[in-house]
Every structure is written in structure tokens, then in C-alpha cells.
Amino acid sequence: MAKLSIKGLIESALSFGRTLDSDYPPLQQFFVVMEHCLKHGLKVRKSFLSYNKTIWGPLELVEKLYPEAEEIGASVRDLPGLKTPLGRARAWLRLALMQKKMADYLRCLIIQRDLLSEFYEYHALMMEEEGAVIVGLLVGLNVIDANLCVKGEDLDSQVGVIDFSMYLKNEEDIGNKERNVQIAAILDQKNYVEELNRQLNSTVSSLHSRVDSLEKSNTKLIEELAIAKNNIIKLQEENHQLRSENKLILMKTQQHLEVTKVDVEAELQTYKHSRQGLDDMYNEARRQLRDESQLRQDVENELAVQVSMKHEIELAMKLLEKDIHEKQDTLIGLRQQLEEVKAINIEMYQKLQGSEDGLKEKNEIIARLEEKTNKITAAMRQLEQRLQQAEKAQMEAEDEDKKYLQECQSKSDSLQKQISQKEKQLLQLETDLKIEKEWRQTLQEDLQKEKDALSHLRNETQQIITLKKEFLNLQDENQQLKKIYHEQEQALQELGNKLSESKLKIEDIKEANKALQGLVWLKDKEATHCKLCEKEFSLSKRKPPIPEPPIPEPPPGVEFKKSSMYRCSLGKKDMAATASSCVTNSTSASPVALPSAPISICTRIGFSGEKN
């Protein structure tokens, strides 16, 4: 049906002979058939409310594949009356037909089958070879001129039904069509013959004009021949004069050669004397150069050692900074390269499309030009035959002139050869002189360059000496800084040792305070027995109050509670007897370190817990 609709549209449009409107029935049927072809095998896309099955999705892909289709897509989206994607697709097909690029757009789609597989099933018409055949038939629609109004039409609600009656044929219609075909063929032949007559008349008139121009050119050639003969006579007279002048020139050149030979010999002798003096100067300068170059190498070696020491210190700090900067620069460079590659790809793609359009237009122009050239060559052949006859007569006259000129030239050539040989001898002598002068100048330039190099080396040696002094100053500063650094390290070590000792003392005090936190002194009425020996207090074992010992200042974070102490004291005679039965040292039970005493004491201490 697509083939029938395309062929019927082309035949009817050519017989109609005018631009087609949107009301033309074959054109309407063509759009219906194309809509069915694009819907064949289309995948169904599910949404929340309904199922979508439209051809607007694959047609939107054309904008990405063919940039010239962006105008159609933008104009379709801007149309106010279109609300559904099917209406946009119908408007897109009409605009593509008016642009005469429907075949190009659909060809881009068919080539990209990977992208089409998202919208079509594998058995769809657009995915098979029949789709390519339909696209090939659409190329014929470029002959048709269509003027379609898209704004006013209601493309959303149109019903796409194919009218098969337009493609069914009766016997009478077939007979009438055959007659019409015969009449059309006769009319075409008549028009062809009339066009041939017009072309032949135009070629005859052009040939008449060319014959007139050739006759005029013939008369001009005859006049030029007469002028050429007169010129030959004048040339002969000038040849005689030149021969006489050549003889005089030969005499003068011989005299000039003799004079130049004498001058050259004198200059050679002077050059030899001057060259010996220059060689001596050159050898002395060379010796001085060697000595100074050795000195320079020694100084450079020392400088390289010192500079390497300095650079090693600086490079260690700069390497990290360089790595960071280089990574940042590479990231920026890679981003720029990506953007440039994208821009280049877009430009190349646009140039390709422009070149393809230009090639099509040029091929059409070439075909027209070939037809014209074939016609022109036939007319030129006739003119060439006439020209050949005229040229033969001209060649005979020119041959006679050439023979006479050759005789004159042979005589003049012999004289010119002699002159050229003598001129070559002169040139050789002049070149020798120039070479010697150039050699002299080069030697002088070399001497000046060597002097400049010597002065430059002296300047460098002075700079090296200043650098040495600066380096020594830096070394002294470095040693002073090292001494200060060592002294500061020793001071820090001493401070650390003192701090560690103070921390240990504080920890010991804290542990002693924790051990004594639960201890409480008993009242006087409750203390009847000694807690160490478990004996009652009596006259022999008294409990007089002991004066409180001096309490040291508590360290930060530690608090001592004030308390009273009682002990049972014996007489001086019983000290040694009771020493084994009672504790000899009371420091372990007291919250504060008491002064050690050699006497035997009985203390009464009450603990908050059960342990004594």
C-alpha cells in the first residue's frame, strides 16, 4: 500500500501540474499510509493511567541524528493547537514533506537500528529491509511541491483509515488511461521536436557569428605577416651592427684581462704576508682560551658541589608543592581537552553534512555541463577543420622565415660562445678574490668572538667568587642555628624529666589519700581497749592525748581531715618488755606520716569498716 500510494501521488501530482493543498485526497491517503507504516510493530509503553503507543518518540530521535531537523521539532512544539503526541507526529510528517527531506530524515532512523529497538519490535516494518525500500521510494516525492497549512487543522482527532477504492482499477479506466498515455507520448514527441528545432536554430546563428569572427582574424593574420617581414629586414641590419660591436668588445675585454691579471698577482702576495701574522695571533689566542677554560672547569666543579648541597635542601620542601600543583594542572588540562574534543566533533559533523549537500548540487551541475559540452564539441570540430587549412598556409610562410633566421643565429652563436668563455674566466678570478676576502673577514670575526668569550668568562668567575662568599656565610648561620637547636633540645629534656618526677610524686600522694579516705578517729568515751594489743587502758597503760604532729601542706586536689590521737604509754622501765607485744611503729595506721619513735605505743583507731 505504501508503494501504491507513493506512485499514485507522484502521477496525480504531475498530471495536476500545481502545488498540492491539504485537501488533495491522494496526499491525505499518503499521510494515513505513512502513519500505519510507522505504527507497525511499535512497542507499548505502560504508564500509571493508560498504555501509550505513539510514533512521536522515534521521530524525536531524528533531531539528535540529523541537526537540520531541529527546526521542524521546535516549530511542531510551538504549535498552539496540538495537545497529543500523535498530532505532533502528523504535523512533523507534513512539514518534512514541504521541506522535501522526509526521505533523508527517515534514512537516518533506519540506519540506527540499535536506537530504534527501544521503540519497535524485532518484526516491525522499520526494522526490516522493507523499511529501506519505502525510504527509497520517498525520494521521488522531492518532485512534488506542497503548500500545507498546519496551524488551522485538527490533527489530534483525525481518523486514519485507508481508502482502497482509490487504488482499484476498472477495464474502461484502463483503456482510457492507455489512450491518454499514447496522446501524452505524442505530445511529448512534438515538444521534443520543437525544442530540437529551437536548439538547432540557436547553434546555426552561433556558427555564423563564429565564421565572421574567423574571417576577421584571418585578415588580421595577413597584416601581421607583412609586419613580420618588415621586422625581419630590420633584424638583419641590426645583426650587422652587432657583429661590428662584438669585435670592439673583444678587443676591450682582452686589454681588461691583462690588467686584472697583474692586479690579482699583487693582491695574492699581500694576502700571503697578512695570513702569516693572523695565524700567529690565532695560535696565541687559542692557548689563552685553553688555560682559561681549564680554570673555568675547576671553578664550575666546585660551584656544582656547593649548589647541589643547597638545592638538595630546597628541593625536599618544593617537591610536595610541585606534585599538588601538577595534579591540579593536569585535571584542568584534561577538562579543557574534553571540551575541545567535543567542540571539534560537533564542527566536523556539521561540515560533513554541508559537504554532502554541496556534492549533490555539484553532481547535478556537472550533468548539465556535460550535455552542453557535447553540443559545443560538434560545432568546434567544424571550425577546427577550417582553422587547419588556414594554419597550413601560415606554416609554409613561417618555414621560409625560420630557415633564414637559423642561418643568422648559427653565426651569432659562434661569436657568443667565444665571449662566454672569456667571461667565465673573468668570473673565476673574481670568485677567487671574493673567497679570500670572506676568509679574512671570518678570521677577524672569530677573534672578536673569542675576546667576547674571554670577557664573559671573567664576569662569570667574579660571580662565582661572590657566590662562594655567600655560601660560606650561609654555612656559618647554619652552624649557629644547629647549636641553638641542640641547646633547646637539652632544656626540653630536662623539663620533661622534672615533669615526670613531679607527676610520680603527685600519683603517690593521691594513692595514700585514697587509702585513708574511710578512716575515722573514735571518741574518748568509746576508746576502752587498745586496737593493736586488745588490752584495757589502766594506770599502767594510759591514754594521754598526743599533740598533733605538723601536717604538711596538701598538694593540689588532696585534702586532709584534722583528728586526735591517743596511745597507751608505758613507763621507761617497761619499754623493752612490751616492745614485742605491741606495734613498734605507728606510721602505718596514721593518716599523716608521724615522726618515728623507738618507744612501744598502743593506739586506739576506729575504722569505718571491719578491718583493723
Image (cartoon, helix red, strand yellow):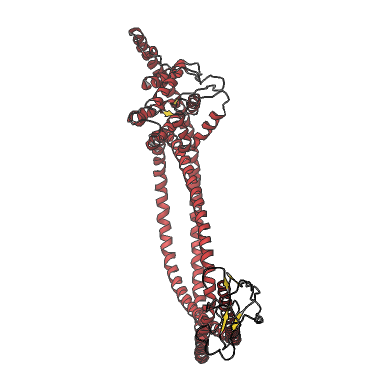
| Residue at the image position 42 percent from the left and 64 percent from the top | 411
218, 141: nearer the viewer: 141
Residue 422 in the figure: left or right of residue 317: left
Q: Position of residue 5 (x, y in %)?
A: 39, 19
Regarding residue 124, the answer to whether it shows in the image is yes
| Residue at the image position 50 percent from the left and 78 percent from the top | 430
| Depicted 287 relative to depicted 353: above or below | below
Residue 125 in the figure: left or right of residue 600: left
| Depicted 393 relative to depicted 577: above or below | above
| Depicted 350 relative to depicted 243: above or below | above
For the N terminus, the quadrant is top left
Regarding residue 467, the answer to whether it shows in the image is no
347, 20: nearer the viewer: 347
Q: Quadrant of residue 557?
A: bottom right
Residue, far front: 539
155, 401: nearer the viewer: 155
Q: Position of residue 161 (x, y in %)?
A: 42, 16
| Depicted 125 relative to depicted 492: above or below | above
Q: How many marks?
A: 0
Residue 422 in the figure: left or right of residue 518: left
Residue 187 in the figure: left or right of residue 511: left
Q: Position of residue 317 (x, y in %)?
A: 54, 73
Q: Position of residue 380 (x, y in %)?
A: 41, 36
